[in-house]
Amino acid sequence: TLASASSSSDSDTGGASPPPRKKHRASAAEGAGEPGASADITGLSSMQANGAGQGQESTELSCLNSAQNGESSSAGGTHSNGLLSSTDNGNSVGTSNGSSTGPVSGTSASSAASGSEAEEDVIRLIGQHLHGLGLNQTVDLLMQESGCRLEHSSATKFRNHVMEGEWDKVSRMKFLLLQQKYLEYLEDGKVLEALQVLRGELTPLKYNTDRIHVLSGYLMCSHAEDLKAKAEWEGKGTASRCRLLDKLQTYLPPSVMLPPRRMQTLLRQAVELQRDRCLYHNTKLDSNLDSVSLLLDHVCSRLQFPCYTQQILTEHCNEVWFCKFSNDGTKLATGSKDTTVIIWQVDPESHQLKLLRTLEGHAYGVSYLAWSPDDTYLIACGPDDCSELWLWNVQTGELRTKMSQSHEDSLTSVAWNPDGKRFVTGGQRGQFYQCDLDGNLLDSWEGVRVQCLWCLGDGRAVLASDTHQRIRGYNFEDLTDRNIVQEDHPIMSFTVSKNGRLALLNVATQGVHLWDLQDRVLVRKYQGVTQGFYTIHSCFGGHNEDFIASGSEDHKVYIWHRRGELPIAELTGHTRTVNCVSWNPAIPGLMASASDDGTVRVWGPAPFLDSQEADGLNENCSNMDS
């Protein structure tokens, strides 16, 4: 265990809901079909301007009490429910749905009319989903028996005009429609017509001038494939028009036209919410609904979580102060008071670790390790009284650099620049250096008593915790610094998430704290861990870094879900203080911990035993679900 004297006092979707739906008999005009497309689009534009549509328009969106809804179709290939019936790769050309036709059973219509608005919405969603599967006759029957229709008649005609490419009939839908029209003219080689659309229709809109400039550049495309590549456009036809409809529907209230694939969206959101609430979910989120069962709630077993001892590494002969997996997850480096660093190889199949090589000669012991971004090099630092650091070539086992600026220095922490060509190092005696791979001093910062270091992804800013219970950001290019985190107790160590947004701090006598570096606020204090004035290193881990793990002076490893303050697991097995925990970045179910008991424990899912045997393992985890 490394004690620290860091308490030094040295100075240095909402939105408004649609109006109530009125139930009434279909008008004669509706039954006869509306003869002109321009009137439909005018009505549709009016509904867009008025939100969900007011007055007469609103009444046409609800389930009908009438005995019939005789909407006729003027577009060829349109099914009786008002939708194009062709499909593309299993998806309907018209993603949303049209109006139903035919006589409505008085009993069924009465039943639907007496239902709640939520029930009507469910019927519409079911109808949309069935249409997407190509079950158009079933959709017709559902709409007839329920007395509902899926969207406004003007929306149906608008959809059909878009899918048929009848741009003159929908020219009032402005920029997106005209852009599609322009691109289709270009693909067909009708350059003059495309130019007329650009000059006479798109430009006068005075909307998105930058985009118009980009569109004008497509006039120089020599052939259709060149146009598709530069415009990142699928070309004239079903695919691009469906995508256009998806964009247009974002401007229309759902009571007029259902959002595309709404049922699938709701189901996917439900599955993702269940996964987010699952304490032990530690695998990649698959957005494909085919990969999950919708018949059962999502639950991950604790047996699948890395809280069972898979291996105990005993090759060190003294306290193990640090452990760290390589960035690609194929190796583990461990540093010990016994003056050695051991490199372990991770078997990609069994996840067992075997000794790869031992790096010797660290007279003061090894208290900190840092892998280079490409895992070619490994830097080893010692405790407070060590003025040297070692830069090893992991591939060859050769010592590339042994750096020491002064015998008075204390180089206890190190961090790599993302370019892999530089690193920063420092210690509590006031040293703060930036060096190259040969140990040559590039820059230095005077008077900073460094406890822990981290380089951010931009390659410019370096975070350093110091003896004033804070983390400051230092820029070696313009020599500026700023305060980011201020704690009330010494910060013994910290680490930063992959995206650079969150910092995980081990704070003396307080435990583990999570900070938002961007907003500079304390997000959460994690409970359970015993933290005094020893240096303990915690880590982010698991898929998407959803979990946090830390050692503790009570000989345990604690694991929390990032969003919860109480531990979800306590791992027992070590017999002395656990100094460091490292989660494998490539294998979410693999974790290692280093302890003063001289061992490194490798944690993984439960072995292939039944649940009773697994719960009876000696080195198991205590379930702390909250």
Image: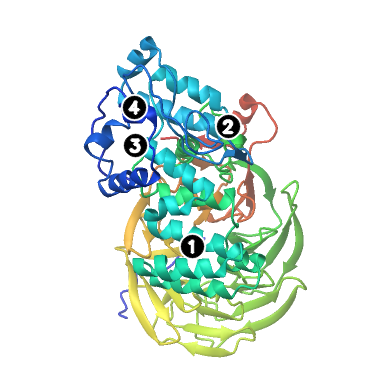
Q: Which residue is mark 2?
A: 133
Separation of disc 1 and disc 3 at Cα? 40 Å
C-alpha gap between disc 3 and disc 4: 12 Å
Q: Which residue is mark 3?
A: 255
Q: Nearer the viewer, mark 1 or mark 2?
A: 2
Q: Dot 1, how many residues are within 10 Å of its Cα: few (below 14), some (14-19), or many (20+)?
A: few
For label 2, the crowd category at 10 Å Cα-Cα, with few meaning under 14, some 14 to 19 and many 20 or more, is: few
Q: Is residue 565 left or right of residue 348?
A: left
- Which numbered disc covers residue 325? none
Asked where in the image residue 55 lies, by quadrant, the reply is: top left
Element class at badge 3: loop
CA–CA distance in space, label 1 to label 2 = 40 Å
- Cα gap from disc 4 to disc 1, whole angstroms: 40 Å
- N-term-proximal mark, 3 vs 4: 4
Instruction: Give the labeled residue for mark 4.
Output: 118
Q: Amino acid at mark 3?
A: Ser
What is the number of the mark on residue 499? 1
Q: Position of residue 94 (x, y in %)?
A: 51, 40
- Of the residues under marks 4 and 1, which one precedes in the sequence? 4
Above or below, 30 relative to 499:
above
**Which badge, 1 or 3, is on the more N-terminal residue?**
3
Kind of element beneath mark 2: loop
Q: Nearer the viewer, mark 2 or mark 4?
A: 2
Q: Nearer the viewer, residue 536 or 477?
A: 477
- Vertical side of 487 occupied by 377: above or below: below
Q: Is residue 618 left or right of residue 31?
A: right
Picture coordinates of residue 168 (x, y %)? Answer: 44, 54
In depth, the one of 578 and 243 nearer the eye is 243
Q: Nearer the viewer, mark 3 or mark 4?
A: 3
- Which sits earlier in the primary sequence, circle 2 or circle 3? 2
Quick check: can you spot residue 511? no
Q: Identity of the amino acid at label 4? A: Ala
